[in-house]
Amino acid sequence: MPNTPVTPQAISNELLMRFQNDLTFAGSIRHHYDERFGQPVDKIGDKFKIRVPVRYTVQDGPAIVPEDTEERTVELAINKNKVVAFKFSSKELTLDISEFGERYLKSAAQSLANQYDLDLLTAAYEGVSNFVGVPGTVPTSLKTYQQANAWLDDMACPRGGKDRFVVYNPKMEVELVHELRDLQESAPRIRWQYEEGRMKRAAGLNFLMDQNVRVHTTGSMAGTPTVVSYSGKSLVTTAWTASTAGVLKKNDIIQIAGRYAVNPITKDTLASLKNWTVAADVTTVGAGACTITLTEAIEPTGPYKNISSAPVVGDLIRCYDVAAPHTTVLSKTSPQGLVYHSNFLVTAMVPMILPDGVHFKARSTDPQTGMTIAIIGDFNILTREFIYRADIMYGSAVAIPEFACRVVS
């Protein structure tokens, strides 16, 4: 069988294949191809509206009141352009593409895949409010992950198939593998787990270890805060410790005592308090007053109802479901694992324009997922080296946040 020569298109194809094979978390997210993302671009900035499932309010019959259809969207901004640059001599162009890939493209693909993974994990944890676990404490039981899975059930997330995943960091995996070391069922899988020291599939979940799992540091959370008022994504509070810098950090999770989560379909009140993610760092002023911006609007009524009842003056604020004083969860460094359905996050890559006047250029796109990489190269006559850049351009957005749950540790 003849060797495959090193050409721009061969380099591009090989790099895309290796990039896809090196994905961890990002490889578990469904990349729905959309022709809107298929038009070549040369710079970041495009924005797309992604529709989320429409919801309605169930009425008692036989008389009805026709309800307006309220379609909601999330914005997906193509705001990431990541590049690896490398060079090689003209001699390397005589190699077979597989040998060339192992020598030069392997590391480039790993670097791009890791950056893509990291960016998607950042968007994921920032867009998810439901959680289990305790900041600063690594989970030691499979039950914690099952509790996160139960959050997905409560939020009407589809079951069945193999679309539910866990992504966690190496220390979280160590604790779980250690706890399950004596299992006697599913012998081949347990043997693999014992020999490899890795989790694979358990309790209806596919387990992925990813060192890019994001790490969050919680705020100081001092005081005994209460609600003053709310409007949309704005929650006015008081009684935090006055002049405390960083009383809440962006991506902290809070609750309002007595205000529970609801099933998004039936609107039935659940047994757990509604979780809210803090959208920006919070510092108190005056007598401990501050306004908290949330990532999600407070909606006590309507088809998108997300809380059992409206907050009122004097409702206590909890942090990570801990009542004040929040001593057990304040200022903790906490990796943020996730239990999720593969549809909760939307991500898209766009093909990049190939310029004229260069020696090498190529672009490869997976027709099923839309993943795409562009290669541009030129010859340096001073050094007889080929200088290449490989680009990916992409964006992501959490479309259905209730289909995921943080596992804080």
Image (cartoon, rainbow, N blue to C red):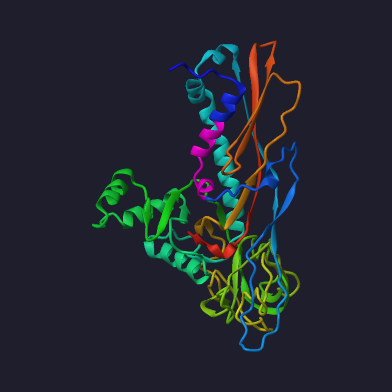
Is residue 110 visible from the viewing direction of this image? no
Secondary structure character of the magenta stretch overall = helix
Please name whichever residue, 59 or 285, is drawn nearer the observer in this view of the structure: 59
Q: Magenta span has 301?
A: no
**Depicted 265 relative to depicted 112: above or below:** below
In the displayed structure, does residue 168 sit left or right of residue 64? left
Residue at position x 66%, y 11% in the image: 383
Q: Is residue 141 above or below residue 381?
A: below
> Which residue in the rendered view is the most extreme toward the bottom?
62
**Residue 173 point in image, percent of width and height:** 40, 52
Q: Residue at x 51, y 42 (%)?
A: 23
| Front residue of this view, candidates 266 and 336 | 266
Residue 300, given in percent of the width and then of the height, sits at 66, 79
Residue 351's quadrant in the figure?
Answer: top right
Residue at 49% across, 18% down: 96
Q: Is residue 270 left or right of residue 52?
A: left
Q: Position of residue 50 (x, y in %)?
A: 68, 57
Tell how many labels: 0
Residue 30 shows in the view? yes
Q: Give yes or no for residue 16 being in the magenta stretch.
A: yes
Q: Which residues are magenta?
A: 15-28
Name the spot of residue 158 as percent of width and height, x first. 49, 64
Residue 68 or residue 287, whichever sits in front:
68
Look at the image and tell me in which quarter the N terminus lies.
top left
Which residue lies at the image location 41% right of the left edge and 57% below the top edge? Answer: 205
Q: Residue furthest front?
A: 62
| Image side of residue 32 versus residue 194, left or right | right
Which corner quadrant of the image does residue 80 belong to? top right
